[in-house]
Image (cartoon, rainbow, N blue to C red):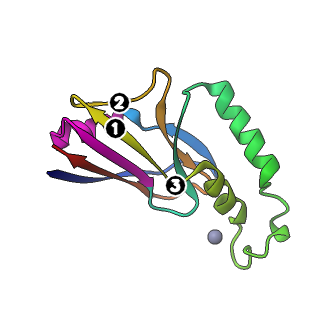
């Protein structure tokens, strides 16, 4: 069995943003040489997510509004976690949007649905953060 590991680094300006990382995961798959297997993609930070959904700007705006309703950034003092920091909302947004995705690899390609794309979701940005890509297979 082949095994391949790669870290993808991001520095999203501002507090929040979504980045389509599908092509970077596909590139890692090429480098791995795996034809049949699985790829795990996970955020290595507790205030960022990896998830799969549509690459559509309206939807991304809707996510932003929805997440802000569920876990508003302000008032910062409303969270007990925010003693010496201000990112309690980012931890909660990460929890909702998830830590990782697993995608099947078939005939050397990511076996995604028609509109499925892999995203990095940043909820406490403005600094370098990383995503792990782990590929296992033959
Ligand atoms: Zn924190």
Residue 54: image location, x then y, percent: 56, 28
Residue 80 picture quarter: bottom right
Q: Characterize the local packing of mark 2: few (<14), some (14-19) or many (20 or more) Cα atoms within 10 angstroms.
A: few
Residue 57: image location, x then y, percent: 63, 26
3D distance between C-alphas at marks 3 and 1: 17 Å
Residue 38: image location, x then y, percent: 30, 44
Residue 129 falls left or right of residue 40: right
Q: Secondary structure at mark 1?
A: strand
Spot the residue most to the top: 114
Question: In which quadrant will I find the C terminus?
Answer: top left
3D distance between C-alphas at marks 2 and 3: 20 Å
* Viewer-nearest of discs 2 and 3: 2
Asked if the residue at label 3 sits under 8 Å from ligand 1, the reply is no
- Between discs 2 and 3, the one toward the N terminus: 3
Q: Secondary structure at mark 2?
A: loop
- Identify the residue at image location x=68%, y=25%: 58
- Identify the residue at image location x=34%, y=38%: 104
* Viewer-nearest of discs 3 and 1: 1
Looking at the rendering, the quadrant in which ligand 1 lies is: bottom right
- Between discs 3 and 1, the one toward the N terminus: 3
Q: Which residues are magenta?
A: 23-42
Can residue 40 be found in the magenta stretch? yes
Residue 15 falls left or right of residue 1: right
Residue 68 falls left or right of residue 132: right
Residue at the spot of label 2: 111
Residue at the spot of label 3: 99
- Between discs 1 and 2, the one toward the N terminus: 1
3D distance between C-alphas at marks 1 and 2: 5 Å
């Amino acid at each position: 069995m082949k095994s391949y590991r790669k870290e993808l680094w991001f520095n999203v300006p501002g507090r929040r943003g979504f980045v389509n990382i599908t092509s970077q995961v596909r590139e890692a798959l090429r480098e791995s040489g795996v034809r049949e297997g699985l790829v795990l993609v996970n955020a290595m930070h507790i205030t960022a997510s990896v998830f799969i959904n549509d690459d559509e700007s309206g939807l991304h705006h809707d996510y932003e509004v929805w997440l802000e309703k569920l876990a508003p950034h302000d008032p910062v003092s409303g969270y007990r976690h925010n003693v010496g920091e201000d990112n309690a909302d980012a931890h909660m947004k990460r929890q909702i949007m998830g830590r990782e995705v697993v995608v099947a690899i078939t005939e050397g390609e990511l076996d995604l649905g028609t509109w499925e794309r892999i995203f990095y979701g940043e909820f406490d940005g403005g600094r370098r953060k990383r995503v792990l890509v782990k590929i296992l297979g033959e």
